[in-house]
């Protein structure tokens, strides 16, 4: 098994979620820095269309979406576990809330003029207009909360997190779970990338102390690769057959079908390939790229739409 390769950029909040998980598990990983906006030709060479950040590469296996990436890292290194034995379902549901409702409330607050003014010097030369246009294309008409409404929700959510931390170090007990890393990353963005608006965190000091505990775990990155080297890894690694698991057919699409898979509401660019696995948790397609070779690209079921490739 080759070392995990994380394709990410420094100010991506979802990438910070996975960077912290890797640190907590002390999994050595290689870093590939990708653009924050399209075009992303090296990313698309691996995924076939999916363009959200981050993606995880292990040889010629490409994993999309941080929910699935967390499951993959748990499989690679089961201890310390992200899923407490007595609260696995709760941990997943809380993480899903954090990655959606909490995230969008935080971003609505962070992207006020004061926050934006601080953010774009960190964005690697990407201008505010280019970034704004790129994210508008990803939203596909998705409604955005007004900054005032987002801040109101954000304050309420922070108080709820503080309530969960009353008498314990982490949201579900004495050790961090997947829920902690999912809740951490939008708050990290507020604190680190848009500190001009970070005073919203001051009313919940227990949340700040919790953030400090998560941030204090040493990074486990061991090196940097350029995109070309990562593509070469994909092209030269033997393709592994998907792990045998029960085929769950909810769509009338047998294995071997040409399918498209896309996010259901944000960043909806589809990836197309041959369906080679559809387990209770995830889908896998096989596709071939001139530079990256033959790959397996994996997506979680929740949050993704599976269709026949010819469907419109």
Image: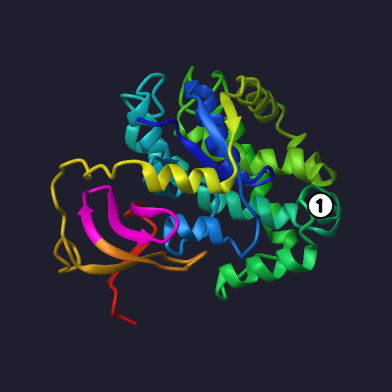
Q: Quadrant of the C terminus?
A: bottom left
Q: Is residue 236 visible?
A: yes
- Across and down, in percent, residue 180 comes to 52, 32
Check disc 1 and report its element: helix, strand or loop. Answer: helix
- What is the count of numbered marks? 1
Q: Nearer the viewer, residue 138 or 29?
A: 29
Task: Magenta stretch: give its range.
Answer: 275-295
The residue shown at (65%, 68%) is 134
- Across and down, in percent, residue 87 comes to 35, 29
57 relative position to 244: left or right: right
The residue shown at (69%, 45%) is 11
Q: In this picture, is 136 found above or below 28? A: below
Residue at the spot of label 1: 115
Q: Is residue 160 visible?
A: no
- Across and down, in percent, residue 25 comes to 47, 22
Q: Quadrant of the N terminus?
A: top left
182 relative position to 239: left or right: right
Q: Nearer the viewer, residue 179 or 11?
A: 11
Q: Is 206 covered by the magenta stretch? A: no
The residue shown at (17%, 63%) is 256
The residue shown at (22%, 49%) is 280
- Across and down, in percent, residue 245 comes to 16, 43
Q: In this picture, is 263 found above or below 248? A: below
What is the chief secondary structure element of the magenta stretch? strand
């Amino acid at each position: 098994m080759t070392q995990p390769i994380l394709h990410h950029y420094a100010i991506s909040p979802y990438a910070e979620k996975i960077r912290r998980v890797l640190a907590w598990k002390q999994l050595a990983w290689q870093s590939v820095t990708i653009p924050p906006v399209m075009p992303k030709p090296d990313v698309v060479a691996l995924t076939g269309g999916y363009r959200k950040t981050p993606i995880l590469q292990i040889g010629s296996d490409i994993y999309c979406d941080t929910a699935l990436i967390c499951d993959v890292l748990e499989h690679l290194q089961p201890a310390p576990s992200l899923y407490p034995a007595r609260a696995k379902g709760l941990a997943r549901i809380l993480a899903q809330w954090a990655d959606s409702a909490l995230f969008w409330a935080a971003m609505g607050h962070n992207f006020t003029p004061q926050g934006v003014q601080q953010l774009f010097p960190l964005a690697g030369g990407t201008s505010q207009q280019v970034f704004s246009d790129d994210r508008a294309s990803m939203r596909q008409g998705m409604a955005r909360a007004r900054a005032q409404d987002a801040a109101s929700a954000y304050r309420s959510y922070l108080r709820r997190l503080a309530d969960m931390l009353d008498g314990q170090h982490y949201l579900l007990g004495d050790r961090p779970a997947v829920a902690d890393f999912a809740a951490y990353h939008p708050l990290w963005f507020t604190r680190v990338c848009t500190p001009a608006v970070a005073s919203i965190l001051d009313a919940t000091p227990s949340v700040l102390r919790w953030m400090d505990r998560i941030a204090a775990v040493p990074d486990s990155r061991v090196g940097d690769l350029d995109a070309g080297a990562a593509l070469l890894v994909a092209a030269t690694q033997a393709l592994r057959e998907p792990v045998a698991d029960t085929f769950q057919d909810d769509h009338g699409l047998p294995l071997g079908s040409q399918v498209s898979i896309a996010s259901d509401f944000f960043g909806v660019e589809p990836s197309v390939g041959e369906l080679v696995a559809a387990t209770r948790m995830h889908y896998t397609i096989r596709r071939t790229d001139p530079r990256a070779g033959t790959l397996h690209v994996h997506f979680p079921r929740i949050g993704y739409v599976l269709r026949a490739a010819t469907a419109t």
